[in-house]
Amino acid sequence: MAGLPMGEPLVCSARGCGAVAVYAVVWNNPKIHPPEREKVWMACEDHRQSLADFLDARGFLRRVDPL
């Protein structure tokens, strides 16, 4: 995935979680970002669904990609 640091372990974006990320939760806030801009939260297995649900409830979720 373009723009991700190489050689460094990716850590889950969930608050307080230090687990290794295995998913990229890709999102965009259409009110403030142009359509082509994608933001990424990293997610471990345990937090993939909760992070995706949080973004989806706001209409921000684009997709969830495995890393």
Image (cartoon, rainbow, N blue to C red):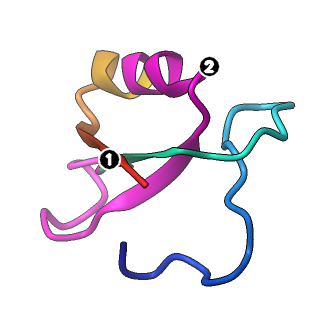
User: Residue 13 vs residue 4: left or right?
Assistant: right
Question: Can you give x and y, in whole percent of width and height, for residue 61 in the image?
Answer: 27, 35
At horizontal 13% and vertical 62% (from top left) the residue drawn is: 35
Amino acid type of the residue tagged 1 in the rendering: Trp
Question: Can you give x and y, in whole percent of width and height, for residue 49 in the image?
Answer: 45, 18
Q: Is residue 66 above or below residue 15?
A: below
User: Residue 6 vs residue 35: left or right?
Assistant: right
| Magenta span includes 45 | yes
Question: Which residues, given as a range, are shown in magenta?
Answer: 28-53
Split into 4 quadrants, where in the image is the N terminus?
Answer: bottom left
Q: Nearer the viewer, residue 15 or 66?
A: 66
Which circle, 2 or 1, is nearer the viewer? 2
The local crowd at label 1, few if under 14, some if 14 to 19, many if 20 or more residues have their Cα within 10 Å, is many
The local crowd at label 2, few if under 14, some if 14 to 19, many if 20 or more residues have their Cα within 10 Å, is some
Secondary structure of the residue carrying numbered label 1: strand
Q: Are marks 2 and 1 in contact (CB under 8 Å)?
A: no
Amino acid type of the residue tagged 2 in the rendering: Asp
Q: Which mark is residue 46?
A: 2
Task: Return the disc, 2 or 1, that comes first in the chain's sequence.
Answer: 1
Question: Can you give x and y, in whole percent of width and height, for residue 20 in the image?
Answer: 71, 46
State the CA–CA distance, disc 2 to disc 1.
Answer: 19 Å
Which corner quadrant of the image does residue 55 belong to? top left
At horizontal 28% and vertical 36% (from top left) the residue drawn is: 60
Q: Is residue 3 above or below residue 27?
A: below
At horizontal 39% and vertical 16% (from top left) the residue drawn is: 53
Split into 4 quadrants, where in the image is the C terminus?
Answer: bottom left
User: Residue 47 vs residue 20: left or right?
Assistant: left
Which corner quadrant of the image does residue 36 belong to? bottom left
| Magenta span includes 19 | no
| Residue to which mark 1 is pinned | 27
Secondary structure of the residue carrying numbered label 2: loop
